[in-house]
Image (tube, rainbow, N blue to C red):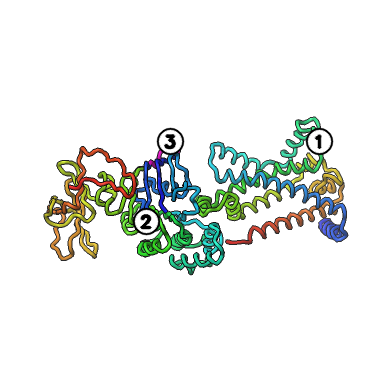
Amino acid sequence: MSALWDGLREAVRLIASGDGELFAIAARTLLVSGSATALAMLAGVPLGYLLGRARFPARTLILAGVGTGMGMPPVVAGLVIWLLLVRNGPFGGFELIYTKPAMIIAQFVIATPLVTAFTAASIQALPARLPDLLAVLGAGRLRTLWLLAREARLGLLAAVIAGFGAVVSEVGASMAVGGNLADDTRVLTTAIVTETSRANTERALAYGLVLLAMAFAVVAVLTLAQQRGPR
Amino acid sequence: MEARLEGVSFAYGDRTVLDVPALRFEPSRVTALLGPNGSGKSTLLRLLAGLDRPRAGRVLLGGRSAPAARAAVAYAFQEAVFLSGTLRANLDLALRLRGLPSVERRERLEEAASACGVAHLLTRAAVHLSGGEAQRANLARALALRAPITLLDEPLAGFDEQGRRRLLGELPALLRRFAATTVLVTHDREEALRLAADIVLLREGRVRAAGPKEAVFAAPPDPETAAFLGYTLLPTHVGLAGVAPGGLHPGAGERTFEMHVEEIVDLISGIEVVGRIGAARAAVSFPTAAPLPSPGERIAVGAPGSAIVSFTATTPDRPPPATVDRPARAPVA
């Protein structure tokens, strides 16, 4: 119990003293996981919209694939991306392995199925006649998409929350493709592993608390946006 | 604004659900698309709204193709659908998408909401309105647009009987005030007769009769259409005779039939004697003061010649009428 208190005290001290390493790692975590989530939204929202609205032969198969992807262990995604990006791998020439872009790619692979599945479910839950209504009212294509997104905002923001929550907390993929390089690819989760292995539990716990606080702050902002607006 | 279909066919996959060589909706008149479920009424309405494209042919609204002329159309779906937000926001969005300035939007939506009896619901969440309220709000949204062409899909669906009766009484005045050319879908004869000047009768995706309602009701082209219009079909030695709704009366007439009485129904406003003429089921209204027959009795019932349409066994299928202003006429016995 005293270790927990020591950790809490250390966390407060590190934050209050403006510890450079802590803030650099936290900022890097936000950059990597935020970018991966944004890219997952760019790919997953249109794909989810298509799966939610359109009817085509392979739709159910793709939905099943997306569902499977939601349960994929991050370390497996990391392993696959590592095999693709490693120096003698098919994309080794890009020299991305053990860089932040490699981590973003791996986290994108983890987040996209979540974003896609949440989007498809929220679009499918809208009244079937809604697009027809907007069409006869004279809404153009972009306006229709915007109004549908506004109607599906609960599900779409749940998609962002789920995607960000999954990637900010994963450790296996970031470790595999990022390499946990100090001052370069170390993020909060890999830093926790490092500090724990060094028996530096106070600092590990401090990183853990900062990670939780950061995740809470991002999710709270998204939840606020989700729960506001017309009912 | 007139609406016109030229050589239009529409199919879901291999199944043709609508085949209309030519049909014209008169400007500034109310036309009812009447027909049983699955006859193609709603499909025709969706083609007029440009929501579906015909597989062949053209749908023209005021000379322009249907999707391009969408700004001329107001459409109330059978199932009222709203966006989240208040009813006011929903009605306002419809007007905003037509590019109207805010002052005019407010005037128009309040006028239509008041006329349709939903002004007191404007601040309520539209998606939480009850069935009847939502249907009236749905109608208000379409009427507020004051579009050259108003399309109403089963506007009286979703009401309880009292609400339906009330709106049925109010709709003609609402349409006169807010709508120009109106096409409404119904499967109910009474609604068609009360609301429309013209009737297009659809069955199995084809126009079976079209024209002013008096002409359509006076001359159904075939026994099936006659039965749908409420005619009593009676076998005769040359084929079938169709007696117009309410055409049978007690006692002998220009044409007299023998009826085997099965049931006496007291409708409070009158008495209906139900029975069989040959194998066909028929009903005759009796005045409340008249002496009534008993079940099992055989009585004479008559009909004036003007109420009877004959369908001879050798009559070939007439081609469907070309336009609503040139109704088909069948020989009258």
Comparing A222 with B71, the one in front is B71
- Amino acid identity at mark 3: Asp
Residue under the image location 81 percent in, 36 percent down:
A95
As drawn, B268 above or below B59? below
As drawn, B8 above or below B245: above
The range drawn in magenta is B12-19
Q: Amino acid at mark 2?
A: Val
For the residues labelled 2 and 1, the Cα–Cα distance comes to 71 Å
Residue A111 position within the rendered picture, expressed as x and y whole percent measured from the top left: 69, 45
State the image quarter where residue A220 is shown. bottom right
Q: Secondary structure at mark 1?
A: loop
- Say which mark, if any, is on residue B14: 3
Alpha carbon of mark 3 to alpha carbon of mark 2: how far? 33 Å
Report the residue marked by disc 1.
A95
Place of residue A210 in the rendered image (x, y in percent of width and height, measured from the top left): 79, 55
Q: Which residue is mark 2?
A: B30
Q: The disc labelled 1 sits on which kind of residue?
A: Glu
